[in-house]
Structure formats: structure tokens, C-alpha cells
Image: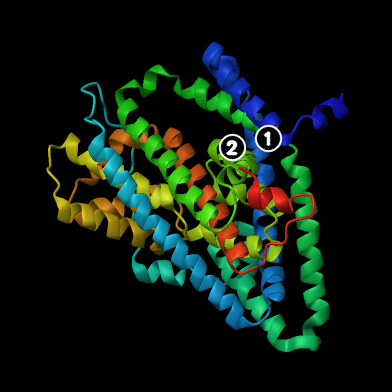
Amino acid sequence: MFKAWFAIPFWQRVLGAFALGVIIGVAQPEAAQALRPLGTLFINALKMLVAPLIFFAIVSAILQLGSGEKAGKIGVQTIGLFLLTAVIASLIGLSVAQLLDITPSPDLVADSNYQPKDVPGPIDVFLNFIPTNPIAALAEGNVIQIVVFAALVGVAINQLGDAAKPFGDVMKAGAQVMYRITKMVLELTPFGVLGLMAWVVGHYGLASLTPLAAFIGAIYLACILHIVLVYGTMVRLAGMSPWFFFKSVFSAQLVAFTTCSSFGTIPAAHQAITEKLGVQKEYASFVLPLGATINMDGCGGIYPAIASIFIAQIYGIPLDWADYMLITLTATLASVGTAGVPGTAMVMLTVTLNAIGLPLEGIAFIAAIDRIIDMARTATNVTGDMAVSVVLGRSNQQAQPSSSNAQQITNND
């Protein structure tokens, strides 16, 4: 039985579980909601991996990359690409919202449980980058603090040279151990996806989404356009077939879609781009955690753009081209400026609404279906992290595909 199960390609197992979850959610909503513990177990297992995986992987990546100058160059290239795609994501969101009729349904009601988000000041966000207690940061899963501390450890080991070589070897071995544990946990993906999708469809039901159908549709369309056109073009320019890229990362996209967690998807994304796309582990280990923290094309680009127009229509407030430019600017800056802040998408939307003078109470109209929207947002964010990893890996001649995949990665159409 196990042989037959593992004989099925991994992405087909995940896709089959996804489809089965949707069917159960539609046919038996109550039974579907009872499957939620399967999804919770899977998410908990992913969360277990995140902190140690990021720490060991980033230290190992810095050691492999060598000099601080090289790591700094890659960091600048990474952030530059993230900012560029965030601007494009905002423009796509604005275009889709303008071209489609997303006028709110008269049946739309505000979520009475909505609580406005407190927007942290720039100083608070900056101070949050530095851990007062690195062990506490690891225990609490504060990703941005783990990234900063791990980078400092890696740079210090490089600077000390032979004196710190034994410690560096321990870090590299730790990274290998975490990669192995990751492979074990990811075998649970089909069961986690089944439980999560069954719960989401069973809990929300299709009828409850009708008043917001146009808004949800606009978000999903913009995300799909961004993924296919922008990320597809990026990997094509890097010399890789977009079809091969999307086929290879599909299982990681499904994990992102069902878990709604960029951080939780790091293990699946890391495995997809290193084992299937030939990106060296030091590149994946450096770009993916950074991307999960600051690359928010779905949350910080597409979502605030479309949501701002939608909320403006609810209150009958006209927007002009200057407002659209301000939306693009604030959404892009907020995607970096709110790194590490919980509830990032809502915080980014709050920043954008404040900037153009729209009432924050409008968020209450879309808060109830945030989970449905977050699925598309997270899949977009994670796909962007993987695309940037591929672009940087190949442009810096760091990707070394295995002999069996090298020709296919370059030429497969």
C-alpha cells in the first residue's frame, strides 16, 4: 500500500487531497469541519520547523556565500527585486479594480467582531528587528529577529576564520539535519491540505461569499495575473521555462494556499527550488526567509490596491490619479516597513487607507472573508520568493542543477 502511495508524484497527491477537501466541504459541511485537526497538526509541524530551519539555514548560507561583501550584494539584489515586484503588484491591483465592476453588493454587512489594527510607528518596527534575547526570539518564532541574529552569527564565524571553524561545521550539520526533518514533515502535506480545505469550504460555505464575490474575484484574478505574467517573465529572463518552474513549485504553492502562512511554507518552498529547480541551498536559505518577511506582493501590493478602491466605493468617495499613486507608494513601503508585524495584510491596508484618507471602518466589510483572500495573497507572496530565488541563483551562476534535470530545467517548454 505504501509503495503505491509513494509511486504517485508528490504534487498529484497534494492536488488530489485539495480537490477531495473541497468536495467534502461542499457535500458534508459539518463532517468537513471535523477534519480541521488534520490541518492544525500539519501547521503545527511546519511551525516546529520554521525557527530552527531559518537559523541554521541562514548561518550556513552566510558561510557558503563567503565574504560579507558578497552576502551584502545578494541582499541588495534581493530587496531590489522585492520592491520592483511590489510596485508592479500594486499597479496590477489598481488596473484590475478599475477594469472590473467590484461595486459592493447591497446585501453586504460589516463584520461586528472587527477590531481596528494598531499601526506601529517606524521606530517601533525598526527596534523590533534587533532581539533583546535571541533565545526568546527562537522560542517565540519572531522571524525577523531570527534572520538578523543568524546573519550576525554567520558573519562573525566568517570573520574569525579557522578559530570558529568547528562551530561553523556544527551550524552546517544543523542545517543538514533540519533539511532532513523537513523532508519527513512534508510527507504529511496531502493530509494537512485535505483537512484545511475541507474546513475552509465547510466553514464558510459558498453562499456566504456571494455578496463579496466580485471583490474576491478581483483579488484572485490580480494574483493569477501577477504570478503568471510577472514571475513567469522573471524566470524566463533567467533562462528557465515558466511552465517547468510552475510545475516544479506547484506543491509549495498549494501548501501556501491552504496554510495561509509564508513562514510555514518555507520548508516546502526550500525543497521545491533546491531539489527540483537546482537552486543552491545557500541561495534558497538566504532569500526565502527574507522574502517571507518583506516580500508581500499579495498582501502589500495587490490587496491594499483593490481593497482601497472597494472601500472607497462603499462610502461613495471618489479617487483620482494622485490617490492611486499614493496607494502604490504606501503599499510598497509598507510591505517592507511592517516586516515582522503580526497581521501584516491588515496593517498594510490600514496604512494605505490612512494615507489616502479613507475610513478604517471600511475594513470591517471585508474582515469576515479575510481567510479566503489570504489564501491567494500567501500563494502569491511565496511564488514571488521562489521566483526571486531562481533569478538570483541563476544570474549569479550559483544554481547547479543535477545532471538528470539540467537540460530539462533550461529547455523544457
Compared across the picture, whether 99 is left or right of 253 comes to left
Q: 32 or 388, which lies in front?
A: 388
Mark 2 Cα within 10 Å, few/some/many (few <14, many 20+)?
many
Mark 2 lies on residue: 254
- In the image, 206: left or right of 23? left
Residue at point 29% right, 37% down?
364
Mark 2: amino acid: Leu
Q: Within 10 angstroms of label 1, few (less than 14), some, or many (20 or more) residues?
A: some
Q: Position of residue 410 (x, y in %)?
A: 65, 53
Asked if residue 208 lies left or right of residue 396, the reply is: left
The image quarter in which residue 32 lies:
top right
**Element class at badge 2:** helix
The N terminus sits in image quarter: top right
> What's the amino acid at mark 1?
Trp
Q: Where is residue 93? Give x, y as percent.
A: 32, 45
- Disc number for residue 369: none
Q: Which mark is residue 11?
A: 1
Badge 2 or badge 1: first in the primary sequence: 1
The residue located at (62%, 63%) in the rendering is 393
> Image height check: is 248 above or below 287?
above
> In this rendering, is residue 131 above or below 267?
below
Q: SS at mark 1?
A: helix
Q: Nearer the viewer, mark 2 or mark 1?
A: 1
Q: Is residue 220 left or right of residue 76?
A: left
The reply to whether callout 2 and callout 1 are in contact (CB within 8 Å) is: yes
